[in-house]
């Protein structure tokens, strides 16, 4: 599967209102299986169903598939239903005995083919085959549903052409059980093909693959025509005698071989008898199965001859009665189908689990490598942090040691400055004192006596 192919989120509009085919007199409608209450109602055109059956029988060595075209609607009561009116076979696909994959080229071819159809004819699902694997959806099938057909009313149709089984799957809306198989679906055709439709559904229900051929009338395009088994004459009366004679011949052959091998020893005789018993048991089972098929064919042939002129629903009622007589066989077939289904699912899960384990192991290895690298980085960073802390501690200790010395030196500078200032002050005072008038000198005497007498007062 190409992982680049993605349809993305698609906005889902409400379904259009339409008339159901089973309420439209233009159509004849017959149920395949037993649609249950709560199932999504699905209508499939008879010619589309015949074309898918023919495609499934084209190659049973690998899985085949295609897309379903039609429309999604709701009736006047608001009940949703799906109508499938055409299909496109997938081209350029990748498939094996147990897988089917859409490729980019597949979608390109389907897109080109759809351009020739009306725009209202939309993809409503897909179909594929499970040759001899049973009817179920594998892990790869769910991948296709999740990525390409994930709308609420999209459906998936699975055909097992080897076992003559087929079934529709619908979305449930439950996250734990997202899809489930419906009890059945409805097949539609023009009301003028009602008898043909009844015969065809009876043939599908008998677990015998239907055969389809195509004819092209003059002046018309090719159209599928369903061919059914024609009534045969009753079994001749001598058939039972012939079977008894064949059994008697086998017993005579056993007696002859036993007589021939008496002289070869007891061990060889036992081995030969066991081999013969196994061969006879295998042939007996094959004859029983063949007789059952012949009885079914004879029953249907006689019933079809007797039902001429009866109502259209007589075949369905007759088929229902006949199916009840084979309930035990159907139960065995259902269990066998379930076993194959579980085997396929287990193989798919084992393959998916192995891929997931390898991917998980690779992711774990990458995480372990990244973890080791991160641990080495953390160790390196721790060492650098330890070194930085040691350097910071040493720098702090050196700074603390230098701080007292700087304080003491500053004090001594202040003391020296104060002393020098005091000395300078004393020297200045002394110098200023030496330059001023002396306290011991007398005032200057006048130069002449007259002046002196005039200035001094007389005493008595």
Image (cartoon, rainbow, N blue to C red):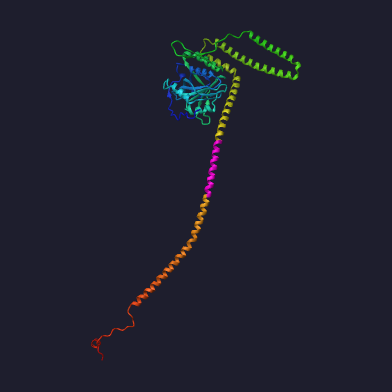
Magenta span: chief secondary structure? helix
Q: Quadrant of residue 375?
A: top right
Rendering coords of residue 403 (x, y %): 47, 61
Q: Quadrant where the C terminus lies?
A: bottom left
Tell me which segment is drawn in magenta: 361-383
Q: Is residue 418 visible?
A: yes
Rendering coords of residue 226 (x, y %): 51, 14
Rendering coords of residue 102 (x, y %): 50, 25
The foreground one among 247 and 130 is 130
Rendering coords of residue 340 (x, y %): 59, 24
Left or right relative to 179: residue 239: right
The foreground one among 156 and 409 is 409
Left or right relative to 457: residue 193: right
The foreground one among 234 and 415 is 415
Q: Is residue 373 magenta?
A: yes
Q: Residue furthest bottom?
A: 460
Above or below, 28 against 443 in this view is: above
Residue at point 59%, 26% (across, down): 343
Q: Is residue 38 visible?
A: no
Q: Is residue 392 magenta?
A: no
The foreground one among 113 and 27 is 113
The tally of labels here is 0
Left or right relative to 298: residue 430: left
């Amino acid at each position: 599967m190409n992982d680049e192919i993605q349809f993305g989120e698609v906005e889902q509009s409400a379904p259009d209102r339409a008339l159901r085919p089973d309420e439209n007199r233009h159509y004849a409608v017959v149920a395949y299986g037993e649609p249950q209450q709560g199932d999504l109602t699905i209508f499939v055109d008879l010619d589309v169903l015949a074309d898918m059956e023919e495609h499934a029988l084209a190659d049973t060595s690998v899985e085949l598939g295609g897309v379903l075209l039609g429309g999604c609607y709701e009736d006047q009561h608001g009940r949703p239903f799906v109508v499938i009116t055409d299909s496109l076979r997938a081209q350029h696909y990748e498939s094996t005995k147990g897988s089917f994959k859409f490729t980019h080229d597949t979608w390109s071819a389907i897109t080109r083919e759809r351009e020739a159809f009306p725009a209202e004819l939309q993809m409503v699902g897909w179909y594929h085959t499970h040759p001899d694997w049973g009817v179920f959806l594998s892990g790869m099938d769910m991948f296709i549903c999740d990525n390409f057909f994930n709308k609420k009313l999209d459906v998936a149709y699975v055909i097992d052409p080897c076992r003559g089984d087929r079934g529709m799957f619908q979305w449930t809306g439950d996250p734990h059980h997202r899809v489930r198989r419906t009890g059945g679906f409805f097949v539609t055709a023009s009301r003028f093909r009602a008898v043909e439709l009844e015969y065809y559904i009876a043939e599908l229900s008998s677990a015998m693959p239907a055969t389809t051929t195509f004819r092209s009338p003059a002046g018309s395009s090719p159209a599928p025509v369903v061919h059914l088994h024609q009534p045969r004459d009753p079994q001749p009366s001598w058939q039972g005698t012939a079977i008894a004679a064949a059994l008697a011949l086998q017993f005579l052959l056993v007696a002859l071989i036993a007589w021939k091998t008496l002289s070869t020893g007891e061990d060889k005789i036992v081995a030969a008898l066991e081999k013969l018993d196994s061969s006879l048991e295998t042939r007996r089972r094959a004859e029983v199965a063949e007789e059952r098929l012949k009885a079914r064919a004879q029953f249907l042939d006689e019933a079809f001859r007797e039902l001429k002129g009866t109502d259209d629903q007589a075949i369905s009622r007759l088929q229902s009665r006949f199916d009840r007589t084979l309930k035990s066989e159907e139960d065995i077939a259902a269990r066998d189908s379930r076993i194959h289904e579980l085997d396929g699912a287990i193989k798919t899960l084992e393959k998916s689990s192995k891929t997931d384990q390898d991917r998980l192991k690779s992711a774990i290895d990458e995480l372990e490598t990244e973890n080791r690298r991160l641990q080495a980085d953390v160790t390196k960073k721790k060492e650098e942090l330890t070194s930085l802390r040691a350097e910071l501690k040493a720098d702090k200790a050196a700074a603390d040691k230098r701080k007292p010395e700087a304080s003491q030196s500053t004090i001594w500078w202040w003391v020296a400055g104060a002393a020098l200032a005091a000395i300078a002050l004393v020297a200045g005072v002394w110098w200023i004192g030496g330059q001023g008038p002396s306290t011991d000198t007398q005032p200057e005497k006048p130069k002449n006596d007259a002046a002196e007498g005039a200035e001094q007062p007389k005493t008595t």
